Image (cartoon, rainbow, N blue to C red):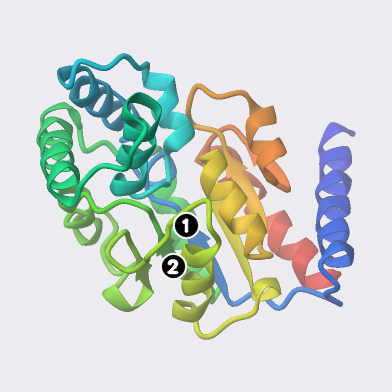
């Protein structure tokens, strides 16, 4: 009974999305994936390296702040910290120095661990004729360079949007609008987004795309829901279990 209730709940969420966005139906062609916290268990290392970098500047912060900033470009995060503490944006030289230090610490702290069942989700998507597209605010070379090793045959430069491709970054919809282009010049009802961060969820919602939250971090589910997530799961395993039903629903309505 609980399984049927959740199936009906998912169906209602997809129907609400179609009505709210004036689409008649879904015509899925691609799934747009965030990277940190969705494919890689890298957010603890990001939060720790950001916190240490900021504290080395003599400023106070806490790790949870960087879960809330997740998805922003590094420059955007640094500007926010500088505005809060100094009342100004950081200079290009300051951004470069701070991000280099943060990247150095990230390499030290990051385990390189992938999120359990991320590979299986990507394989499932591809085996069903859908194109996986990466949409990340990261410019972290140590992670981007690992994608082909950890997820061979899934992504290519033509299907990746990174910090190097965008001018504004999340929570602006630009990254996901670019993801639609890289997915094959798609319109929003031809894709779904898988995100773990509130800013990424907000960006995807602003781009008009149905957004699935996968809450792999310490934030409450409601933060993702308030940011616009249409569905929220707690692991990629949960998403993998429900993906056949998601494809069934989107093919029927």
In primary-sequence order, the first of circles 1 and 2 is 1
Q: Is residue 201 visible?
A: yes
Instruction: Identify which residue is drawn at 69% across, 63% down.
Output: 247
The residue closer to the viewer here, 111 or 122, is 111
Which residue is under mark 2?
133
Instruction: Identify which residue is drawn at 66% across, 72% down.
Output: 188
Say which quarter of the image contains residue 155: bottom left
The residue closer to the viewer here, 182 or 127, is 182
Q: Which mark is residue 14?
A: none
Residue 184 placement, left or right of 106:
right
Name the spot of residue 67 as percent of width and height, x first: 44, 30
Say which quarter of the image contains residue 101: top left
Residue 116 placement, left or right of 18:
left
Instruction: Identify which residue is drawn at 42% across, 60% down.
Output: 168
- Against 191, is 88 above or below? above
Label 1 vs label 2: CA separation? 6 Å
Q: Is there a contact, CB below 8 Å, between mark 1 and mark 2?
A: yes
Q: Is residue 124 visible?
A: no
The residue closer to the viewer here, 206 or 76, is 76
Q: Which mark is residue 33?
A: 1
The quarter of the picture where the C terminus appears is bottom right
Say which quarter of the image contains residue 2: top right
């Amino acid at each position: 009974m609980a399984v049927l209730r959740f199936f009906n709940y998912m169906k209602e969420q997809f129907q609400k999305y179609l009505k709210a966005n004036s689409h008649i139906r879904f015509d899925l062609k691609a799934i747009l994936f965030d990277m940190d916290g969705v494919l890689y268990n890298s957010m603890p290392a990001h939060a720790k390296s950001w916190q240490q970098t900021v504290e080395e500047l003599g400023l106070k912060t806490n790790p949870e702040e960087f879960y809330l900033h997740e998805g922003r470009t590094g420059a955007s995060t640094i500007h926010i910290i500088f505005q809060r503490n100094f009342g100004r944006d950081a200079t290009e030289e300051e951004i470069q120095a701070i991000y280099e230090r943060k990247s150095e610490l990230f390499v030290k702290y990051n385990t390189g661990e992938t999120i359990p069942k991320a590979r299986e989700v990507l394989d499932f998507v591809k085996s069903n004729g859908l194109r996986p597209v990466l949409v990340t605010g990261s410019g972290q070379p140590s992670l981007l360079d690992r994608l082909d090793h950890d997820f061979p045959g899934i992504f290519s430069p033509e299907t990746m949007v990174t910090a190097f491709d965008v001018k504004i970054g999340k929570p602006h919809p630009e990254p996901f609008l670019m993801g639609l282009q890289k997915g094959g010049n798609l319109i929003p009802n031809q894709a779904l987004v898988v995100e773990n961060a509130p800013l990424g969820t907000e960006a995807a919602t602003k781009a008009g795309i149905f957004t699935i939250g996968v809450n792999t971090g310490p934030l409450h589910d409601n933060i993702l829901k308030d940011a616009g997530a249409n569905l929220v799961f707690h692991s990629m395993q949960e998403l993998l279990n429900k993906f056949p039903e998601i494809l069934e629903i989107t093919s029927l309505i």
